[in-house]
Image: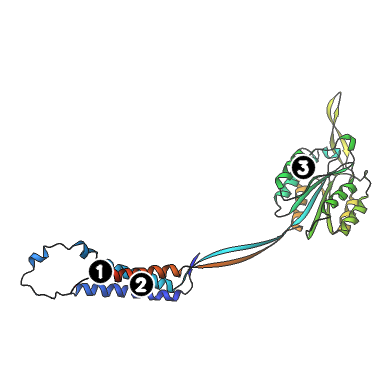
Amino acid sequence: MFRFADPYYLLLLLVLPLMIWWYWRGRSSATGKIIYSDIKLLKQVKPSLKQRLRPALFVLRLIAVTLIILALARPQSSHKEEEITTEGIDIVLTMDVSTSMLAEDFRPKNRIEAAKMVAKEFIEGRKNDRIGLVVFAGESFTQCPLTLDYGVLYHILDNMKVADQEWDGTAIGMGLATAINRLKDSKAKSKVIILLTDGRNNRGQIDPITAARMAKAMGIRVYTIGTGTRGTAMYPIDDPLWGRRYVPMRVDIDEDLLKEVAAITGGKYFRATDTEKLREIYKEIGEMEKTKIEVKEYTRYEEFFVYFLTFGLLLLVLELVLGNTYFKKIP
């Protein structure tokens, strides 16, 4: 942006038309000093280059005065700068990857694919937040520590699969404890765990309530999500003789436990019965856990009057020098 700090000096520009009028008035009223009886021959003489260029002295003076007036008005260029202070949130997505997550009551394919898709959408909506990923079935594992590199998270989610049969199960307490361990050294003012499961705690050495109390002691808020339709859901079974077939599986989510875990830590329990409801839940959690951003705006001004004044004075000096040397006129 460009501005004049003292714009009232620009009123002096009204002097320029007066200067032009005075100059042309002087030229038109000029009379000869020597009287001749006949000047026809003199009129046939063409003006020299010096004579044709002499009005340039007045142009130099006009430009010089203009630049000096502009310098008095103090031209400035302004640059706006922003200082952004962010207070990010540390979030650990804790996802159930037991084989029951293959139940096909969610679109586009099954629970695990829907959970991965919605989790990626949730990550896309975050800025300046460190996000980690923990998965659990019969045991729990850290898939990705807290990071700002969301591309890594997308890649891990894309390749995430349900657990093998040997470590199948639902160790909610262990999954929660592993997520707490990822957040124990966090310096963030807000620490959050989003725990998603479709079953009951049936494995692991740590009870979910004990893990929830640990989270509370460390200032970690836990949001729990029960995932699965109500009633039964179709579950795929690969039969060595008949190939893949589907059997109805009863949806059994320990909602009372998940509500208690969330309540202990100051979080909230949600029930997702389809993909769209799951998407709404993540959106609601995202609204509740907003990153704090403070923006301070500064404006810096750079003075240009020195350049205008310098060129103006140089043009005045040039006019004086040329007027008393090359363009000097003898009356």
Task: Residue 20: give its label.
Answer: none
Task: Residue 65: give its label.
Answer: 2
- The reply to whether the C-beta atoms of the residues labelled 1 and 2 are less than 8 Å apart is no
Percent position (x, y) of residue 50?
Answer: 22, 64
Q: Residue furthest top?
A: 241
> Observer-nearest residue: 67 or 166?
67
**SS state under label 2:** helix
x 22%, y 75%: residue? 26
Mark sitting earlier along the chain (1/3): 3
User: Tag 2: residue type?
Assistant: Val
Left or right, 84 with respect to 285, comes to: left
Percent position (x, y) of residue 44?
Answer: 11, 62
Q: Gap in Å between the C-alphas at discs 1 and 2? A: 21 Å
Give above or below for 264 relative to 145.
Answer: below
**SS state under label 3:** helix
Residue of label 3: 114
> Observer-nearest residue: 307 or 116?
307
User: Tag 1: residue type?
Assistant: Thr
Residue of label 1: 325
Q: Gap in Å between the C-alphas at discs 3 and 2? A: 74 Å
x 74%, y 43%: residue? 117
Mark sitting earlier along the chain (1/2): 2
- The reply to whether the C-beta atoms of the residues labelled 1 and 3 are less than 8 Å apart is no
Q: Residue furthest left?
A: 37
User: Tag 3: residue type?
Assistant: Ala
Residue depth check, mark 1 versus mark 2: number of the one nearer the observer? 1
